[in-house]
Image (tube, grey):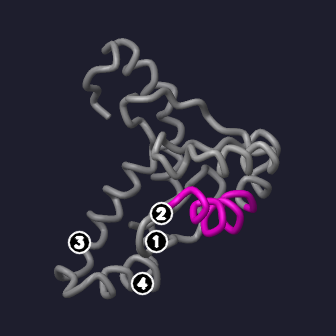
Amino acid sequence: MDWGGISTRLRTPLYHVVGNLTGVRYQNEILQPLVVPALQAIGPRAIIQDDNAPPHRSAAVNTFIQQARVNRMLWPANSPDLNPIEHMWDELCRRVQQHHPPPANLGQLLKWLQQELEWNGVPRAFIYNLIHSMRQRCVECLAQNGGHTRY
């Protein structure tokens, strides 16, 4: 599993998670070194949008989020996944398929994503459009009573 964060102003480094991601690991390996500095760079109105995966909602993570004064977007259980990062992952898959033959192994794929700059090569305009589509994504989701949307 890989983890990355995007905003209209910056993107975090891409982080490869080896093994199972627990709440403690999420806090120590992702939130503290990657998310909090990024949110601080963005400013006091920055918001983290994660999902309801168990590591994201552990007691330790919730305590850390409060103590670090991180603004978190409320995300109802069983909600449709409207997170723009999902479209970023799709774009990364397209970019790897377009620029490379199928990877021979996981190590080669990670190299292409991290060292060959696929993650950093996604244009800022693409990310900007994803994030600025959030309002319309939510409107459409509500109009469909939580059902299928074009997103």
Q: Residues within 10 Å of mark 2 (few under 14, many from 20)?
A: some
Q: Name the residue under label 3.
A: 98
- List x then y, in percent, for residue 89: 36, 58
Q: Name the residue under label 2.
A: 21
Q: State how far apart marks 1 and 4 are (Cα).
A: 19 Å
Let me know if residue 33 is in the magenta part: yes
Q: What element carries label 2?
A: loop
Labels 1 & 2 near each other (Cβ < 8 A): yes
117 displayed left or right of 9: left
Q: Is residue 146 above or below residue 84?
A: above
Labels 3 & 1 near each other (Cβ < 8 A): no
13 displayed left or right of 76: right
Q: Residues within 10 Å of mark 4 (few under 14, many from 20)?
A: few
Labels 2 & 3 near each other (Cβ < 8 A): no
Q: What element carries label 3?
A: helix
Q: Mark 4 points at which residue?
A: 116
What residue span does the magenta drawing correspond to? Answer: 21-37
Q: Residues within 10 Å of mark 1 (few under 14, many from 20)?
A: some
Kind of residue at badge 1? Val
Give residue 103's quadrant in the image: bottom left
User: Residue drawn 38% across and 37% down?
Assistant: 81
- Mark 1 or mark 3, which is nearer the start of the sequence? 1
Labels 4 & 3 near each other (Cβ < 8 A): no
User: Residue drawn 54% across and 47% down?
Assistant: 128
Quadrant where the C terminus is found in the figure? top left
Kind of residue at badge 3? Gln
Q: State how far apart marks 3 and 1 are (Cα).
A: 25 Å
Disc number lying in front (4 or 2): 2
Q: State how far apart marks 4 and 2 are (Cα).
A: 25 Å
Disc number lying in front (3 or 1): 1
